[in-house]
Structure formats: C-alpha cells, structure tokens
Amino acid sequence: MASEKVKVFTDANFGEEVKNGIVLVDFWATWCAPCRRIAPIVDQLAEEYTGKLTVAKVDIDENPMTPSKFMVRGIPTLLLFKNGDLKETVVGLETKDRLAQLIDKHL
C-alpha cells in the first residue's frame, strides 16, 4: 500500500523511530476507504520531502498499542512529530497542500 519511501512502524519500534527529526505518521487500516484515498497523498509527501522528513504508516489492527497511546479515535489520523514531540494532529482526509503547510511550519 505504501511507496518505498514510506516506512512501516510498529508498536515495537515506534518510540525509537519518532525521536529524531521530523516524522509524519499515518495511522490506517486495510478496510478503511478514506485511508486508501489519502495513501497517494502520503506517498507523494514522502517523495517530495525525501531527506527532510520521515514518512511512515502504522496499521492500527496489527499495532493497537500505539494508536491507543496517542488517542487515535478515527482513521486516517496523521501525527507529525519533531524530535519525539507531537506537534500536529490531522484526523480524516486532508489536502496535500494543507499537509505540506503543516510540515513546512516545522522544518
């Protein structure tokens, strides 16, 4: 479902992966239609921000602890971290331009 530029995070590696730099994490599930609609946007952001930002996905069905920790109630939910600190939360479909604005604010 993800491009080669998009990493896959799990409950086991999440904390380590978000602690350095700027990281955009897409919480999704295979059965979620809006998740499939936002996936190409997430892939495009991963391509366009290569070297500036890490983009990753967390499958909420396979990794229930991390979404619970961050109170993810609906999907897709995108969380933007900077050096381990949660900076932005986006729930539901969002435009590429709006997501880019949120990312640029923290670069």
Image: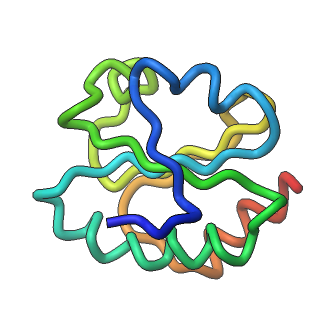
| Residue at the extreme right of the image, as rendered | 107
The percent position of residue 37, horizontal first and vertical second, equals 30, 77
On screen, residue 72 above or below 45: above
What quarter of the picture does the C terminus occupy?
bottom right
- Asked whether, in this view, residue 39 is left or right of residue 95, the answer is left
- Asked whether, in this view, residue 51 is left or right of residue 57, the answer is right
Q: In the image, what residue occupies the spot 39% across and 70% down?
A: 39
- Asked whether, in this view, residue 89 is left or right of residue 36, the answer is right
The percent position of residue 29, horizontal first and vertical second, equals 22, 51
Q: Quadrant of residue 100?
A: bottom right
The percent position of residue 15, horizontal first and vertical second, equals 58, 20
Q: In the image, what residue occupies the spot 26% across and 25% down?
A: 64
Q: In the image, what residue occupies the spot 72% across and 77% down?
A: 48
Q: In the image, what residue occupies the spot 61% across and 50% down?
A: 24
Foreground of the two, 82 or 92: 82
On screen, residue 107 above or below 85: below
Q: Quadrant of residue 66?
A: top left
Q: Quadrant of residue 86?
A: top right
